[in-house]
Image (tube, rainbow, N blue to C red):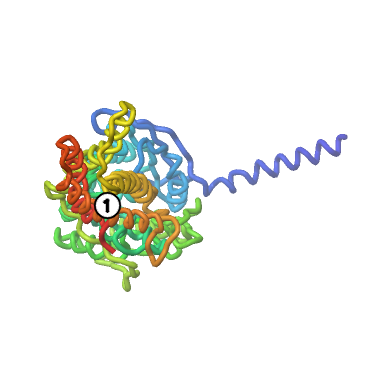
Amino acid sequence: MRMIRLLLASVVLLGLAATPAAAASEPVSSEITFRGDGGIVLHGTVLTPAGSPDRHPGMVLVHGAGEGTPRTKLMGEAVAFARTGMSVLVYDKRSSGYSLFHRDYGQLARDALGAVAALRAQPGVDPAKVGIWGLSEGGWVAPLAASQSSQVAFVVTVGGNALEPLRQQTWATAAGLRKAGVSGSLVDRAEPNLYRVIADGGLFPEPWYSPGPVLEHVKQPMLGIWGADDLLTPPQETPPLLAAALERGGNRHYTLRYVPDADHAAHQSPDHGVTRLPALAPGYAQLVGDWVRSVSAGRLPTAQAPDPLPKQASLSVPVPRPAWWESAFAQLAVLLLMIVAFAGYPVVALVRRVRGRVRPAVGRSPRVLAAAGLATVAGFLGYLVPVLMSGAKLASPGPLLAGRPVIWLALQALAVTVVIATVLTWVVRRRSEASGERVRLTLLAVGGTAFVPWALYWGLLLP
């Protein structure tokens, strides 16, 4: 028994002796609170290199899109960056004043500046060497914060974008559809028009935010990183636009790099950006750490851009503000007109049947128009909105035939039926002698007539 106790004690002593050495490379964490825009209290964690007596650089991490995103979402990045020798502050994103349909990049930038002030005050941090790192949406926020404060020493963006948010989103969703094999009017016409209407209706936050003028006011050194398999940010277009904006402002201290086999967030991806693994891409954290140390030591980069650029399957296209006739209000008005016209015809017929009234013989075309019109409008809304809002990485269009989703082809066939039935209904209406029936047929035919330009706008009558 005594021998067993001695062996156990030896094991414990050996474990205690080995623990400091094993933990020396692990960062030390501490919890802090600070005030963001409007005085909101935000909670964060500071990770500091263990056993580092000298003052070291610091970096604040800014989340991508999402309401109230917890700091744990970026804890893997925070730990990896701290291991490279810097203090890292990661904080819970605000939920107050931020939602799926509303956000203010200026407000988020002021939150980030509050985090910068808090990190600058931490023991062991060199206040002159604290910068901001931004992921995705944070790629718009971090430069905006830097453009507003000289206390930001440098800027790092990952998956950042030099395009307007709406243009980036339409490209990403279209890229997902094309990756799934879709071609034709669904991706070329319906997809961008839906996002324009959503944005015009106030359901897409900051749609036409322009990052170019902001980047022109960024004077700090900047590191831009993209995963080579990024499916959310146009990888071929963004770096030249970002570099051009910085240079227009007189800033040539930038480095732009790609990380191989990495997704939008520079994480490992086994399927070219569709699936994100928890692990960061090899070399990514070290790239950031080495660049920050170099910049903090006064060795500023000079216009380092990637060459060659990766290829995109398709280029993004401008997404202009809609004209009055394609605005959200106009689209809603046309939808209501068509629903009332198409649904009113069978409702009146049902009421007549319940009351025992004789229905005038008008032929099949009005019934076909009412049924096909309702089916097309309902099917369009029930299919298009879920497919295009299912995620920009890889939309789910369903089975395809010649590059067209089978459901979309069925909707297009119904749309052609509506057009033919509309013409025939106008003919029936001219021949009708009963005044009440003429009114009913007129409303139905007007709904069918309004359907034609509506269906052309949404690509239902286009190949």
Q: Position of residue 19 (x, y in %)?
A: 62, 44
Q: Residue at x 34, y 67 (%)?
A: 313
Q: Quadrant of the N terminus?
A: top right
Q: Residue at x 22, y 46 (%)?
A: 197
Q: Quadrant of residue 198?
A: top left
Q: Position of residue 387 (x, y in %)?
A: 38, 50
Q: Is residue 180 visible?
A: yes
Outermost residue to the left: 324
Image vertical order of residue 289 relative to residue 102, above or below: below
Q: Residue at x 25, y 42 (%)?
A: 205
Q: Position of residue 74 (x, y in %)?
A: 43, 45
In the figure, is residue 42 to the left or right of 245? Answer: right
Outermost residue to the top: 355
Outermost residue to the bottom: 308
Q: Nearer the viewer, residue 284 or 98?
A: 98
In the figure, is residue 17 to the left or right of 7? Answer: left
Q: Quadrant of the C terminus?
A: bottom left
In the figure, is residue 272 to the left or right of 217? Answer: right
Q: Is residue 218 visible?
A: no
Q: Label 1, on which residue?
A: 418
Q: Position of residue 105 (x, y in %)?
A: 24, 42
Q: Nearer the viewer, residue 408 or 221?
A: 408
As shown in the figure, which amino acid type bears the numbered disc 1?
Val
Q: Residue at x 31, y 59 (%)?
A: 187
